[in-house]
Amino acid sequence: MAKYKILCTLNQARVAGTEKHLLILLRNLNRDLFDPAVVCFSDGPLIELLRKQGIKAWSLKRERFLDYPTAKRLYSLIKEYKFDLLHSHCGQFACIIAKLAGVPYLIETRHGLYLNFDQLDKVNFLRSLINKNKAKFVDMTITVNKIDKKILSEKFGAPENKIREVANGLDLEEIKSLKIAAQIKNELQIA
């Protein structure tokens, strides 16, 4: 059975919040079934870290949102590797290119709308229009909290059946190591 080819996209190649989230997902992905790859739209330590884990990773620097040279390189990469799924952690840029390149299934994780219901009346027309049309480019949107899911469906008209909430994940190994560190400090009576 052929492996399912997944391309994940990120804006940054640092190792911080969203990038750590992706590392946890990739670490727990069944490699017998899935063949993951990652594109970052900047340079940084994440690229080398992924490659050391046996994951194909590329840096495609993007200067602005509508960056034609980067779009062309991403399109070529998608066509060359024939990805089955694109999981964007960086907005619609990659989703639009993947749709044009014929990727069968598109997922976008919204790592935060950074809005609450009180601020929605002040959202400018362009941002509102973009948010209302995003659902047309993806098969599923993942939000990291209930409020964002509610805003997407109620205020921006995204179909509720295309939105899933997956609460921001935690790395249990990292938490266990923090607990052990606290125990050691306690035993050594270090404040």
Image: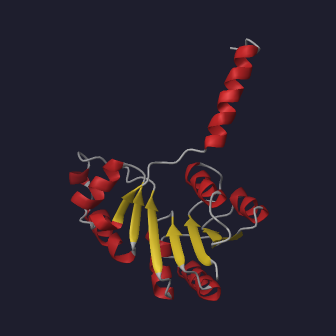
Residue extending farthest top: 189
- Residue 37 in sight here: yes
In the rendered image, the quadrant that contains the C terminus is: top right
Residue 24 point in image, percent of width and height:
62, 53
Residue 12 point in image, percent of width and height:
60, 59
Q: Residue at x 37, y 54 (%)?
A: 113
In the displayed structure, would residue 58 be above or below residue 75?
Answer: above
What is the image's colouring? secondary structure
In the displayed structure, would residue 179 be above or below residue 16?
Answer: above
In the displayed structure, would residue 80 be above or below residue 187?
Answer: below
Residue 150 point in image, percent of width and height:
28, 54
Residue 121 lies left or right of residue 100; in this view the side is: left
Quarter-of-image position of residue 127: bottom left
- Residue 155 in sight here: no
Q: Residue at x 23, y 45 (%)?
A: 118
Foreground residue, 64 or 94? 94
Residue 129 lies left or right of residue 85; in this view the side is: left
Q: Residue at x 67, y 68 (%)?
A: 31
The mark tally for this picture is: 0
In the rendered image, the quadrant that contains the N terminus is: bottom right
In the displayed structure, would residue 158 be above or below residue 119?
Answer: below
Residue 83 point in image, percent of width and height:
58, 81
Foreground residue, 72 or 169? 169
Quarter-of-image position of residue 8: bottom right
Foreground residue, 164 or 74? 164
Residue 108 lies left or right of residue 118; in this view the side is: right
Quarter-of-image position of residue 107: bottom left
Q: Residue at x 69, y 58 (%)?
A: 46
